[in-house]
Image: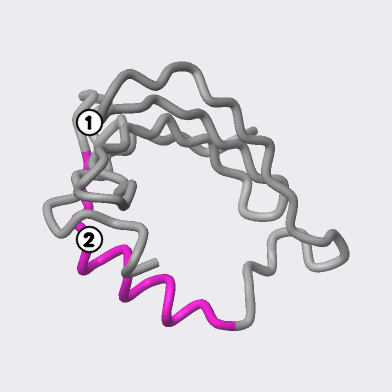
Amino acid sequence: MTKALHSELAKRIVIKDSTGNTMLQNMGASTLIYYTRKNKNGNTLNPDKPFHADIIIYDIYNNVATVKAVTNKYKFIDYIHLGKFGDEWKIVNVLWEYLK
C-alpha cells in the first residue's frame, strides 16, 4: 500500500451526518496505510469468498489516469486518479462508496 500511494493522497467518501446533512469524510495516505496494516487477516464481511477486484481503466493520458475498482470481499467501489511520477504510477485521489 505504501508504494502505491502518493504521500499527499486524498481519499474521500460522501456521507450524511447525524442531522442528515451531506458532507465529505477525508482520509490521507498515512491513515489508509495504518488501516491496511491493521487489517492483516482480511475483511470478515465475506469470509467464504476469495478476494476479487474488477478493474476498469477509463483513460490514460501522458502522466494521468482514471480507474474504477470494485471489490467483492471488501464491498467498496473506488474511482481512482493516478499520476505518473518518474517511472512509477501513484494513487493521488480516490472517491469511494460502499456497495449495497
SS at mark 2? helix
Q: Quadrant of the C terminus?
A: top right
Could you tell me residue 13's position as x and y percent?
A: 32, 36
Q: Sequence order check: which comes first, mark 1 or mark 2?
A: 1
Q: Is residue 25 left or right of residue 68?
A: left
The N terminus lies in quadrant = bottom left
- Say which residue appears at 29% left-offset and 57% top-offset: 5
Q: Secondary structure at mark 1?
A: loop
**On residue 72, which mark appears?**
none
Task: Say which residue label 1 marks.
Answer: 19
Q: Which residue is mark 2?
A: 29
Return the residue nearer the eye: 11 or 59: 59
Over which residues does the magenta segment extend?
25-40
Q: Position of residue 60 (x, y in %)?
A: 39, 21
Q: Is residue 46 magenta?
A: no
Q: Is residue 39 visible?
A: yes
Q: Is residue 13 above or below residue 56?
A: below
Q: Residue at x 41, y 35 (%)?
A: 96
